[in-house]
Amino acid sequence: MLFVGFHGYKAPEHILEWLKQRRIGGVILFARNIDSPQQVEALTKSLHNAAKRPILIAIDQEGGTVARLRTGYTESPGAMALGAADDPELTERVSGVLATELRALGINWNLAPAIDITHNIHNPSVGTRSIGTDPMHVAKHAVAQIKGFQSKGVAATAKHFPGKANTPVDPHIELPIIEGKLEQMWDTDLVPFRAASEADIASIMITHVQFKDIEPVYPSTMSPKIIKELLRDRIGYKGLVTTDCMEMKAVTNKYGPGESAVKAAVAGANTVLFSHTREYQEEVYAALLEAAESGRVPIEQIDYSVERIIEVKNRYPAYPKPDLDLIMKPEHLDIVLHAAKSAIVLHKNDNLLPLMPSQEIGLIEFASHIEQERLQPDSETIFAETLKKRLPNLVTTWLDSIEPSPMQLREAERINDESKFIILATRNAYISQKQLDASKKLIDDKTILVCLRNPYDAGVLSAETMLLTLGDSYPSMQAVSMVLLGDFEPDARLRVPLTMD
């Protein structure tokens, strides 16, 4: 019932030993474990070989913002982009691409899709991970994603039950509390999860949000009212129930690792995730064992959990697996690019497009924090490199999206002054005051605003031409580059409001 994570491209000896001893049922991988496909294949093989029984290897490969496999793998647009494209067959094909590549790597459990409904645009942990605001629209694409993942041999996971988007709080930081009534949720947030249950999804992940109308004391991960009464009894879900990572501060601010894990098991969670800290994992193992021996977690409940886990392992075996040469094959790249093109929203166009290679064009980009880890002051971003393939004379600069430095701001102003047209690429300026202030100073009648992450930047900024990518995965950057050069005119429809009433 215990699933754990670790650091590094190779499994530490203690992880291999725990697998041999059957102390854990599997592992969860993060970007810290991912390098080349050959490295990941060797890593998963070592884990599978160490285990005395089949295991599940999990990863968060939602596509879009949350994707642990990026460079060297097929990236895909995320949920909001797929919702805007609104082609369930295409959604299923994109998820099938991701699942096929996971299977080739020896990964058989995907902690996706995220099917939270957008309520509060300021929720920092949802954003473009949400398909949209309409429950039936979200449910339709959720089912398509589930079919895509599971038809290609990877267990899917609907998250974050019973819905965590109706709050501005991130459970990584503190416990979110939602006051809404259960009956309201039945016709909103719970619609996609009910559809996922009916679609025979392999697992459902419980969020740490506390829903006061249902559970007055605990986060959902520790609540029998949420897991047993709502999910199992009322919705009728029969599959595997997993916690979100129990090392988030929504849990650790109040509960120790051992006690939180036991409470989750008592509440009805079949698997408990501790993703980072060896000391916590050891404490949790001891606490769960003691709870089992003392009867605090009844043996019947343990048996039921083990049955659910074995069922998923049997449905989604890791071997035999596809070959690595499936990764980034042309057909996969074509599918995700088609999806990205189908998702671009032209929010406003005042005759600045298309751009011509002969024009004096500048790119001012607020860089992603993931990319900044490798960037030098004079480096070019992936978006800049993508555009330069078509605009060889493009002048570029990047700025920190949270704290742009005075030097970065001066360089941006210089490029802005000297260019006939400016592509201003923002990333979540609507929740970053310094990025917002800098963007407002840079925008004039020659600016093309490209909102590379959440579309909500278009609700607080105004430019002559505005393009929304609904995410900054590589195919989305390719697609918006094609729009800028006039290769096609986008016709996707935005499925979320740009501002909150």
Image: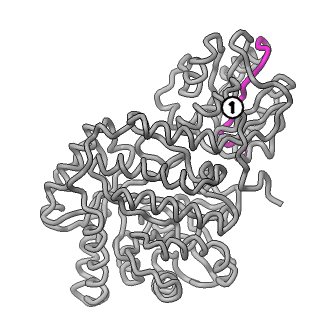
Q: Magenta residues?
A: 418-430
Q: Quadrant of residue 150?
A: bottom left
* Residue 182 found in image quarter: bottom right
How far across and down, in percent of the image, does residue 26 sit?
Answer: 26, 62
Q: Is residue 428 highlighted in magenta?
A: yes
Determine whether 431 is above or below 315 in the image.
above
101 on left or right of 225 = left
Question: Where residue 228 sits: x, y (%)?
Answer: 45, 86
The residue to which callout 1 is attached is: 488
The residue lying at 28 percent from left, 77 percent from top is 288
Magenta residue check for 345: no
- Residue shown at 42%/66% (left/top)? 246
What residue type is disc 1 on?
Phe
Q: Give the quarter of the figure containing the N terminus.
A: bottom left
Q: Is residue 277 visible?
A: no
Picture layout, residue 212 above or below residue 129? below
Q: Considering the numbered disc 1 on the image, is that residue within a helix, a strand or a loop?
A: loop
Q: Nearer the viewer, residue 266 or 175?
A: 266
